[in-house]
Image (cartoon, rainbow, N blue to C red):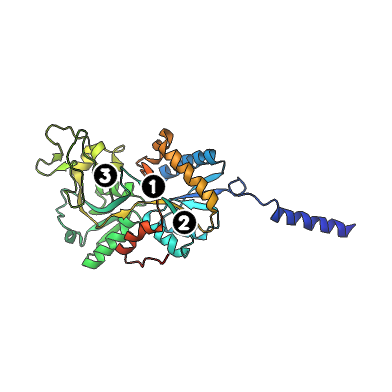
Amino acid sequence: MRRITVLALVAVLALGVLGFAQELGTRGRPIYLLLVPSTEGATVLEVGTQIAEALSEATGLYIEASLQYDYTGMIEAMAASDGDTFGIPASVQYLGIYERTGGNCSIRLASVRYGEGTYYGAIYVRRDSGIESIIDLHGKTWVYNDVGSGSGYVIPKQMFDNLGIVPSGIIESGGHTNTIAALYEGQGDFCTAYYSKPTPPAGWIGDTWEYGDYIERWVWDPHVEDVYAVPGYQTDLSATCRDVRRALRKTYDFADVVREIKVLMLEGDEIPNDGICFGPNFPVDVADTIVDAIKVHIASEAGQALWSDENFYEWNEVMDVTDAFYDRLRVTLQIPIPER
């Protein structure tokens, strides 16, 4: 009798492991959506949780949002996952995930902001600082968000090292919004963050901004030292200014932010936008379901209110991409392009 009981127990345990294992996308085995605090952490988690809930409702999968402590934490969490994790890494982070997993990850979507799949990094200074060129940054206090950020640290650090520019001090803010706020409040001499090209004012019928144009076109007129105004047009800063200064428009006097802070220069070539990446061994069919749900959600009115939030990730649309989309960044960072 005892032998039969033991055999029955073994059978039950075996069925628990082999037959009744929790299915992916249930409360017992959730799918994790990893978020990085590139802007304001509390808002990122709040909005990300709402997005996870909307995707759960659309797919029938239980998806749980998880805010990572920093950029490096995102890379490590993605690399350590096994078939249950996807996330929204910034471009340099994605390259880190690719390297850490030996390519055992899948980038499926990239963000589109105001019609663009790429952005730039920029250096920002106060207009009254006397800083007129990159050389003037030597010996000054640098504000950036995180050492894992492409536009915030990795690319400008490469520039500074090449030119022998050594800051006298650093302030690590934890997010792009915090970075520009710190500069505005006088906590540093210059900062580095993302730059999205300006949008023409309403009614504009001329050409659009291209690389090499005046950086603050439609935002600031240096000849009148005031908000840019095109004869016959009324410029609305909230509609034309798309760079990191825009992140302060709900918490500060936006016009004053622009009056006080200028874009000194861009950091170089375009940077591929952040995207949706699935971690090691994530089932392709489940990934397909989530990708389809994201496309539908972001195109909806409710989705737009979440994804395009300036203190979230400011996504307007998504586009399909593959790993090759990030090769231009590999070239910038002098990282070998992988064989495919």
Q: Amino acid at mark 1?
A: Met
Say left or right for 185 vs 292. left
Task: Give how far across and how far down residue 333 sits, in percent.
Answer: 32, 64
| Viewer-side residue, 193 vs 216 | 216
SS class of the residue under badge 2?
strand
Question: The N terminus is located in which quarter?
Answer: bottom right
* Residue 164 location, quadrant: bottom left
Relative to 297, say whether 145 is above or below. below
Number of the front mark, 3 or 1 = 1
Task: Give how far across and how far down residue 64 sits, in percent.
Answer: 53, 46
Number of the label disc, if any, that sits on residue 276: none
SS class of the residue under badge 3?
helix
Task: Give how far across and how far down residue 277 sits, in percent.
Answer: 45, 53
> Which residue: 16% across, 55% down?
131
Dot 1 crowding, Cα within 10 Å, few <14, some 14–19, many 20+: few
Say left or right for 281 vs 216. right
User: Which comes before the other along the chain, label 1 or label 2?
Assistant: 2
> Which residue: 22% across, 64% down?
165
Number of the label disc, if any, that sits on residue 245: 3
Say left or right for 142 vs 101. left
* Residue 304 location, quadrant: top left
> Which residue: 45% across, 58% down?
75
